[in-house]
Image (cartoon, rainbow, N blue to C red):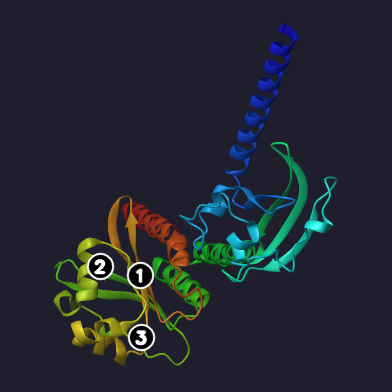
Amino acid sequence: TISLFVLRARERALYNEKVSQMKNWEIVLDETDDVVYVSDAENYDLLYLNKAGRELPWIAGRDFRCRKCHEFFFGTDKPCSFCTMDLLSKDKYYIWERTDQNSGNHYMLKDKLIDWNGRLARIEWAINLTEKEQQQKILSSRLKIEKALLEGIGEMAYATDLEESMNVILRRVAELYKADRSYMMRINDDGRTISMTNEWLAEGVAPAIGNLQHFPLYRSPLWQKAFTKQETVFLKDISEFRETYPEEYERLAVQGIEEMYAIPITIKGKFWGFLGVDTPRRYKGDMYVLESVAYFVADEISKRRLIESSEGKGE
């Protein structure tokens, strides 16, 4: 009787240890961004799907328990034609690639046989190569932007005055965006009109700076809102104004503007004005260039003011 009691106690201890190990496995697998699932190697029952898998748009809210992997993922009543089960071992991962029909994403898949709570099972890691390639492209793009901006900042340091340094950075910003125009816009001392203080133009683009001197704010709902709230301008299509603000739409259309972005410049906590671009053809919808350069523009203005002030006192 004692030996039977000890045997059952040991069995319970082993079972509890296995359960604990499984929970630890699940905790670890739920931390990864890759999709991971486990299915029975004999009957294809889904035994586990990690958090990344449960949050996929076409899976979210569905219960995977008591479902076959081929039925749950692909809606088929028999194992997939591309199933790798017969190719797997416990010794090493079988690595292959496939494009997912639900998302269109391309995945690298790593499959292996494991022991899952006493059952021979297949574990598959699905690594989203499309997402990683996109992230790599974004990173590469960011590095190119930062390199170009650093070169521009270096040029600014050699400029003879504030006017020249602002024109240098406007050229760099416009070239990065492949924009028709880049500019600085400020509110005048009267608080009711705005003026374009600097402008850089792509070849063949007509200047707007002459028409935007002491321009009444009330005539531009777009700029009135931006200056009042000191917030970013992100206009992806000027046709948004065709019905609501026909005069604003006409003014922008005449200049050939299709879309425009502008970011507020703040110097030592005080709002200074806007740095903007018109009709960007590269990095469309991306404010990163403007956001990156805003700090350096503010710093340059602050330094130039300090130099001018000290030179004035010296005289």
Q: Secondary structure at mark 1?
A: strand
Residue 143 appears in the figure: no
Q: Secondary structure at mark 2?
A: helix
Asked whether 43 or 182 is in front, the reply is 43
- The quadrant of the picture occupied by the N terminus is top right
Indicate whether 83 appears above or below 92: below
The residue that mark 2 highlights is 226
38 relative to 183 in the view: left or right? right
CA–CA distance between discs 2 and 1? Answer: 9 Å
Mark positioned earlier in the residue sequence (2 or 1): 2
The residue that mark 3 highlights is 257
Residue at x 47% of width, y 76% of height: 174
Residue at x 75% of width, y 54% of height: 111
- Please identify the quarter of the rendering in which residue 280 is found: bottom left
Q: Position of residue 233 (x, y in %)?
A: 32, 69
Q: Position of residue 150 (x, y in %)?
A: 56, 62
Q: Amino acid at mark 3?
A: Ile
Q: Amino acid at mark 1?
A: Ala
The residue that mark 1 highlights is 262
- The quadrant of the picture occupied by the C terminus is bottom left
Mark 3 neighbour class, 10 Å CA radius: few under 14, some 14 to 19, many 20 or more:
many
Which numbered tag is attached to residue 152? none
221 relative to 200 in the view: left or right? left
Residue at x 19% of width, y 82% of height: 244
CA–CA distance between discs 2 and 3? Answer: 18 Å
Looking at this view, name the residue that lies furthest to the front. 1
Q: Position of residue 93 (x, y in %)?
A: 80, 51
Residue at x 20% of width, y 71% of height: 224
